[in-house]
Image (cartoon, coloured by chain):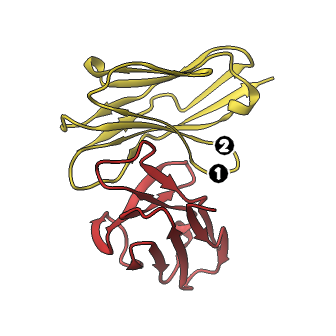
Amino acid sequence: AQKVTQAQTEISVVEKEDVTLDCVYETRDTTYYLFWYKQPPSGELVFLIRRNSFDEQNEISGRYSWNFQKSTSSFNFTITASQVVDSAVYFCALRGSGSARQLTFGSGTQLTVLP
Amino acid sequence: DTAVSQTPKYLVTQMGNDKSIKCEQNLGHDTMYWYKQDSKKFLKIMFSYNNKELIINETVPNRFSPKSPDKAHLNLHINSLELGDSAVYFCASSQKPRDIPYGYTFGSGTRLTVV
C-alpha cells in the first residue's frame, strides 16, 4: 500500500517569508515517482514537479525548491520570498512502479500568504 | 487546445437523478482516471482505464459506472444521486510507465452539487 502524509493542514505566512511544505511518503516499491501539484482558488490542478526515486538531486526552479531525501522518505517543497499569488492548496503525490498507475495524493496543505 | 476537457464544469441536480460527466483527452495517452475531491480537498482515485480496459475500481458505490468508448474518452455516469456525492470530480490521463516528464494531465474539474 502507498501512503502520502502532509501533516501541515494550514500554513499562514506574511509575504516575502520563506515557507516549507512537508511531505512524507510510504511505499514498498523500489522505483517510484513523487509529484507536487498546486490547486489555486480557481480549482484546477497545476503540475509543479516530478521526481524519480533514483534521482535524489534537489531541484530549484525560480522561487521554488524541492528537497528529496530517500533516507527519511520525505519530499519537501520550499517557496522562497512568498507572494500572495502563492496562496493555494499544495498536494504531494506518489506513484509506484506497479501496473496500477494512479497517483496517491496527500491530504494537501492550504498555504495562505498575507500581504 | 485543451488537453483534458471535462463537461460540464458545474452540475447542480436533485437527489435521485441520474447524471453523466464527460471527459476527453487529445494527448494520445493510454490511461485515464477519475478522481473525487471531497469538501475537505482530499483527492481519491475512483477508476482507472487503460486502453478502454478497467484496471482500477476503488471502493466506489455501484451507482457510479465509468464508460470508455475509446482510449480518448472516459465518461462517468452516476445513478440515483445522493447528497454525499456532492464533490469536485477530476478526470486525468497519463502515458505508459515510460512517462513523458509531466506524466499526468488533469482536467479542470466538474463541481457536482446534489440538492
Quarter holding the C terminus of chain A is top right
Q: Residue at horizontal 26%, vertical 43%?
A: A96
Q: Residue at horizontal 36%, vertical 78%?
A: B62
Q: Amino acid at mark 2?
A: Pro
Say which of B93 and A100 sits in front.
B93
Quarter holding the N terminus of chain A is top left
Q: Amino acid at mark 1?
A: Gly
Which residue is the site of mark 2?
A40
* Colour yellow maps to chain: A
On the image, the x and y values in percent for residue A54 come to 26, 28
State the count of labels: 2
Q: Residue at horizontal 59%, vertical 18%?
A: A19
Label 2: chain letter:
A
* Colour red maps to chain: B
> Is residue B11 visible to the viewer in this orientation of the structure?
yes
Q: Does dot 1 land on a helix, a strand or a loop? A: loop
Label 1: chain letter:
A
On the image, the x and y values in percent for residue B27 come to 48, 62
Horizontal side, residue A10 vs residue B71: left or right: right
Asked if labels 2 and 1 touch by Cβ distance under 8 angstroms, the answer is: yes
